[in-house]
Amino acid sequence: MTDQTLETAETILAKVLTDVSLPELPNHTSGKVRDSYDLPDGRRVMIASDRQSAFDIVLAAVPHKGQVLTQTANFWFEKTAEICANHIIDMPDPNVVIGKRLDMFSVEIVVRDYMTGSTETSIWPMYQRGERVMYGITFPEGLRKNQKLSNTILTPTTKGMVGEHDETTTPAEIIETGRLTQAQWDELAALSLAIFVKGREIAAANGLILVDTKYEFGIDPDTGQITLADEIHTPDSSRYWLMESYASRLANGQEPESLDKEFLRLWITSQCDPYKDPVPNIPPDTLLEFSSKYVRLFEQVTGQTFAHAPMDRPVIERIRENLAKALPEFF
């Protein structure tokens, strides 16, 4: 990277959205990537920052990431609304969703089609360690990294707080510990598989493999209906591979070409053990390459051209201006 390119990269990175403090709004909570504000009337304002997490750690910030996540999720919420209700009420800014506040379940439903992954809760690292019963499922000997599984599987985890790791679990443990009833688990499992099938079909039609993803659900306190929340099929919550090169790269023992945060995970694991060692600073060019992958995914999945929100002023100023129009009673 030349000095001029580095200066440009650092200028762009200086304008990313990391601090999402809006004192005008009540009941602020901050997650790894999103900040939320709970309004008295049951609505929740969710702002996707550019913060980048991996291995359950916030590591850096990626330009336009929050916008990509919000607009990608909105695309998928619309495409799957006939399968499952979702929390969306309004989207007043490229980084902001106003949604219905739900009583969230304390589990994440992870759906997988391939033997892959790099985190401690992914099936490939567990399989490499010699485990053959994972998430209550028995796996055969002789599986290879990145190969397609014989069946789509569900591998639930318990949800970790900021700074904590998600933990593996099984449907039986979820029910035994009272996190879900049997009926709730059955409904979440059926909804998750149906949503995944829809996502897989749309991704395939656009030259992508939807490898795996996670879903979070809650109960609508007014209707009692199970409702999809958080995000859906984004490059943060999902793994996407390019279909065109998958077979040849698998045959040659190469990693599939990805358009998700596995790119960053693999860079980190090539530098250190993120569960034991400090993660080194991520170079600016790596973060910009990462940003371009997120934008490419949005465009390839949706068929839309990504409209880069202007970065001529701090993103938080634009967000405050748009929220003042949507929620004038608070501004």
Image (tube, rainbow, N blue to C red):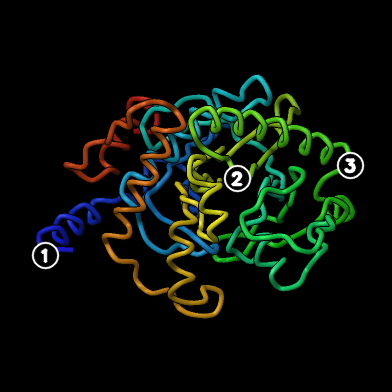
Q: Which residue is mark 2?
A: 211
The mark closer to the camera, 2 or 1, is 2
Q: Residues within 10 Å of mark 2 (few under 14, many from 20)?
A: many
- Residue 330 image-quadrant placement: top left
Q: Which residue is mark 1?
A: 3
| Disc with the residue nearer the chain's start (2 vs 1) | 1
Q: CA distance from mark 3 to mark 2?
A: 27 Å
Amino acid type, label 1: Asp
Image marks 3 and 1: residues in contact by CB distance under 8 Å: no
Quadrant of the image containing the C terminus? top left
* Nearer the observer, 58 or 307: 307
Left or right of residue 242: residue 60: left
Amino acid type, label 2: Val
Is 67 drawn above or below residue 81 in the view shown?
below
Taking the view exactly as shown, the residue that stands out farthest to the top is 82
Q: Position of residue 269 (x, y in %)?
A: 49, 70
Is 305 drawn above or below residue 319 in the view shown?
above
Image marks 3 and 2: residues in contact by CB distance under 8 Å: no
* Nearer the observer, 251 or 82: 251
| Disc with the residue nearer the chain's start (3 vs 2) | 3
Q: Which residue is mark 3?
A: 182
Is 63 drawn above or below residue 38 in the view shown?
below
Left or right of residue 185: residue 144: left
Taking the view exactly as shown, the residue that stands out farthest to the bottom is 277
> Residue visible at 26% across and 41% down?
317
* Nearer the observer, 3 or 149: 149
Q: Position of residue 252 (x, y in %)?
A: 53, 58
